[in-house]
Amino acid sequence: MDARYPIPRKYKGRSRVTNGKTLLAGMDGRTKWAKRLHDLVANHVADLGGPGHVTQSQFILIKSAANATIVLEQWELQFAKASTASLPELLAYLSVLNSLRRTFETLGLDRVEAPSNGMQTYDISKLTPDEQQRLKLLNHKVGEVGVGGLSENDAGEMKMLMEKCLGRGYGPSVTEPGPRDRPFHEIVYPNYSRR
């Protein structure tokens, strides 16, 4: 098999799910379930910074979490109408709820703000006072020698501090060694020594 397989298809050759026309193949988008599913998925994608910041894997988890949420909501309505819940029903509810919690922990519980008009906003208040001072010194050094004049260590430290200001960065995590765009708190940075 060719290492480049599968080759992405042109727009008209892809499924309705891939093209974003529907969330589940064969589902009528007018049902209550479909409408609620669409709303939940859209809200979760927005919480993670918008479609441009959500990977395919995250989207699959989001869709599964939205379906689990709908199941939980239906059980809650059933419990409220009956004013009671049997032990097996309650255990099943708690099992789905716990799975949903783990999915949300995997996705990240913090809202990620999408940059407005393509501009990134740096919030220096996310840095400690020492880190703020260090960023000012590095910025001053860039003004004197240019970015190319920074040592590899200083350039890496400046990148880390700026990504902390953004709340997002590019790098590996503890569980995933491959670098990619992710929330800042998930990234494993090298220990930058000051020389």
Image (cartoon, rainbow, N blue to C red):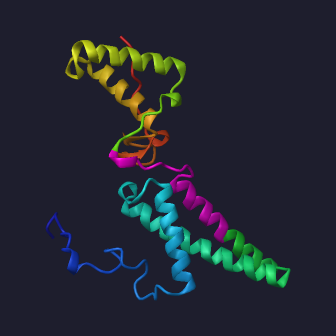
Q: Quadrant of residue 90?
A: bottom right
The total number of labels drawn is: 0
Figure check: 76 above or below 49: below
Assess whether residue 114 is covered by the magenta stretch: yes
Give yes or no for residue 167 being in the magenta stretch. Answer: no
Task: Indicate the position of residue 72 as horizontal and vertical percent values.
Answer: 66, 74
Please name the predominant secondary structure of the magenta segment in the image.
helix
Image: 47 above or below 166: below
Is any part of residue 179 visible from this angle?
Answer: no
Q: Give the left or right position of residue 93, taking residue 157 as reference.
A: right
- Could you say where residue 60 lies in the image, as x and y percent from the top left? 44, 68
- 50 sits to left or right of 3: right
Image x and y of residue 23, in percent:
43, 77
Residue 91 is at least partly visible in this image: yes
Name which residue lies at 22% across and 14% down.
145
Q: Which residues are magenta?
A: 96-118
Rendered residue at 61%/76% (across/down) = 70
On the image, the x and y values in percent for residue 147 come to 24, 22
Q: Residue shown at 51%/62% (left/top)?
A: 44
Residue found at the far left of this picture: 2
Q: Name the image quarter holding residue 87.
A: bottom right
The quadrant of the rendering that contains the N terminus is bottom left
Work out which quarter of the rendered image holds the C terminus and state it.
top left
Query: Which of the two residues, 4 or 157, is positioned nearer the viewer here?
Result: 157
Residue most toward the front? 117
